[in-house]
Image: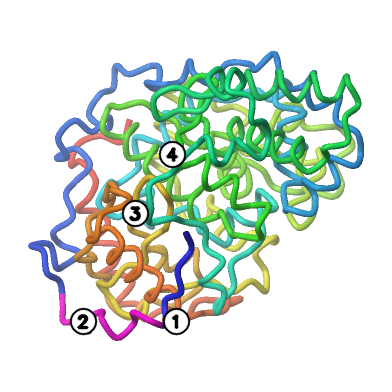
């Protein structure tokens, strides 16, 4: 159920300062000091969970059977780019060495990547544009997709089929299996049934499960099923997708499996770190041909006539060296697809926004990434009193209060336009860079 926030806004106590122990930027731990962080594991060659992102042989044949009518529903729901990425997923080549090196720079306290001279993160506004999802606007808090109640997977899947044999094959304990849903779609298409909306909903579950919520081999959780189901009702799912990716990066950084949208992460890396669009090149960039950027359009459209800055970076050791020495000049802070876009910032220093989803509440700290946001830093930011990641318990009173509080904070968050230049006081810049240096191990950058 999606709740209104106006009725309970008065129940939320005013912010009176950090409630937990960490109340200043200086309390951030060095990456090498975080127990279990993979930054301290130079022998690591493969990211845990990597093998679950193997090719999905049943996806493309199923999508090729969909008539234009069904695809029209997906476009109407804002899934055009997700559909194109899914249809070309077997052509994509994931560079896991770069993803591993990036995960080693992920800080679980701030949910951001810590580079030598700056912090950066995947912004909600960036994610919406990269994946073509309906963008969140201030005043649209009622359209953020989440639920505070227990989820009945059968009631959601009943819109697709009511046959118990189908429902049993599609579900197991807390998970929904995508292959039986794809098989159901295939049978419906071959029979040329006219249940267009139901087939489109089933296709949305499959493509979003593979591209946005790849939690485990061919399966998604009930929570993410509910998020996907809400797309056809006009709900915004960007926060759930980004929160899921943040949580997976934290899992990977602490030695657990990576399970988020690898495609969203590679799109972000491609725009900020790997590629520069160049008009006068006469040959195609071979790296681009198998990169997700080759299959997206709109504001993110990048010609394959591009220059790959990292073409010579091969292997995990080379990626570690490159990223751990990345400078401000090497990172495209204000990519062209974000020009003119507004970025949502927290109301107060130390009070983070939180990304809403059905699995976890995830602290969102765009104010730490001041160069990327284009908002001049006036003070070194404080840590929020919120936990970086908070597991949700749907149906619990405290969980409902937490979700309502998060919605109210989004309603009141300040907004800042991306600036052409960031005017920064030299003393403040020096303080900020010195604080970042404290997060790096003292010895060695390799």
Q: Disc 3 marks which residue?
A: 361
Q: Where, by quadrant of the figure, is residue 208 drawn?
A: top right
| 400 left or right of 70 in image | left
Residues tagged 2 and 3 counted as in contact (Cβ below 8 A): no
Q: Nearer the viewer, mark 4 or mark 1?
A: 1
Q: Disc 2 marks which residue?
A: 13
Circle 3 SS class: strand
Q: Badge 4, how many Cα within 10 Å: few under 14, some, many 20+?
A: many
Marked residue nearer the N-terminal end (2 or 1): 2
Which residue shows up at 21% across the image and 81% down it?
A: 13
Specify the label residue 414 is tagged with. 1
Compare residues 146 and 119 and report the one nearer the observer.
Answer: 146
Cα separation, mark 4 vs mark 1, equals 32 Å
Specify the label residue 323 is tagged with. 4
Compare residues 397 and 100 and report the one nearer the observer.
Answer: 397
Cα separation, mark 2 vs mark 3, equals 19 Å
Q: Where, by quadrant of the figure, is residue 308 drawn?
A: top right
Q: Where, by quadrant of the figure, is residue 237 drawn?
A: bottom right
Q: Nearer the viewer, mark 4 or mark 2?
A: 2
Cα separation, mark 2 vs mark 1, equals 19 Å
Prevailing secondary structure of the magenta residues: loop
Cα separation, mark 1 vs mark 3, equals 20 Å
Residue 312 is inside the magenta segment: no
Which residue shows up at 56% across the image and 43% down it?
A: 269
Q: Nearer the viewer, mark 3 or mark 4?
A: 3
Specify the label residue 14 is tagged with. none
């Amino acid at each position: 159920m999606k709740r209104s926030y106006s009725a309970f806004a008065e129940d939320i106590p005013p912010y009176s300062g950090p409630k937990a122990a960490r109340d200043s930027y200086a309390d951030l731990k060095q990456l090498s000091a975080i127990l279990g962080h993979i930054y301290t594991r130079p022998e690591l060659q493969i990211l845990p969970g990597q093998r679950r992102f193997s090719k999905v042989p049943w996806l493309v044949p199923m999508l090729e059977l969909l008539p234009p009518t069904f695809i029209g529903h997906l476009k109407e729901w804002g899934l055009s780019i997700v559909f194109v990425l899914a249809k070309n997923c077997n052509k994509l080549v994931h560079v896991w060495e770069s993803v591993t090196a990036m995960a080693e720079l992920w800080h679980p306290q701030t949910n951001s990547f810590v580079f030598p001279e700056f912090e950066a993160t995947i912004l909600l506004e960036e994610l919406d544009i990269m994946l073509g999802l309906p963008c969140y606007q201030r005043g649209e808090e009622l359209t953020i997709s989440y639920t505070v109640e227990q989820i009945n997977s059968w009631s959601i899947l009943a819109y697709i089929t009511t046959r118990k044999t189908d429902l049993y094959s599609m579900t197991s304990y807390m998970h929904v299996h995508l292959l039986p849903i794809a098989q159901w779609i295939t049978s419906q298409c071959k029979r040329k049934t006219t249940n267009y909306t139901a087939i489109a909903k089933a296709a949305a579950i499959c493509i979003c499960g593979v591209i946005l919520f790849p939690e485990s081999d061919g399966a998604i959780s009930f929570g993410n099923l509910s998020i996907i189901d809400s797309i056809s009702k006009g709900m915004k799912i960007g926060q759930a997708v980004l929160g899921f990716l943040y949580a997976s990066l934290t899992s990977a950084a602490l030695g657990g499996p990576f399970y988020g949208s690898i495609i969203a992460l590679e799109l972000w890396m491609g725009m900020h770190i790997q590629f520069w669009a160049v008009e006068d090149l006469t040959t195609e960039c071979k790296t681009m041909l198998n990169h997700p950027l080759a299959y997206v359009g709109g504001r993110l459209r990048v010609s394959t006539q591009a220059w790959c800055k990292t073409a010579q970076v091969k292997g995990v050791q080379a990626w570690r060296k490159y990223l751990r020495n990345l400078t401000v000049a090497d990172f495209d802070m204000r990519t062209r697809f974000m020009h003119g876009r507004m970025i949502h910032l927290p109301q107060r220093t130390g009070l983070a926004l939180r990304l809403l989803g059905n699995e976890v509440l995830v602290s969102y700290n765009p104010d730490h990434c001041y160069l990327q946001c284009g908002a001049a830093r006036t003070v070194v930011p404080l840590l929020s009193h919120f936990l970086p990641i908070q597991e949700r318990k749907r149906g619990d009173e405290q969980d409902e209060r937490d979700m309502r509080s998060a919605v109210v904070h989004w309603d009141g968050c300040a907004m800042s336009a991306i600036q052409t230049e960031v005017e920064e006081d030299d003393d403040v810049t020096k303080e900020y860079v010195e604080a970042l240096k404290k997060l790096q191990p003292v010895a060695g950058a390799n």
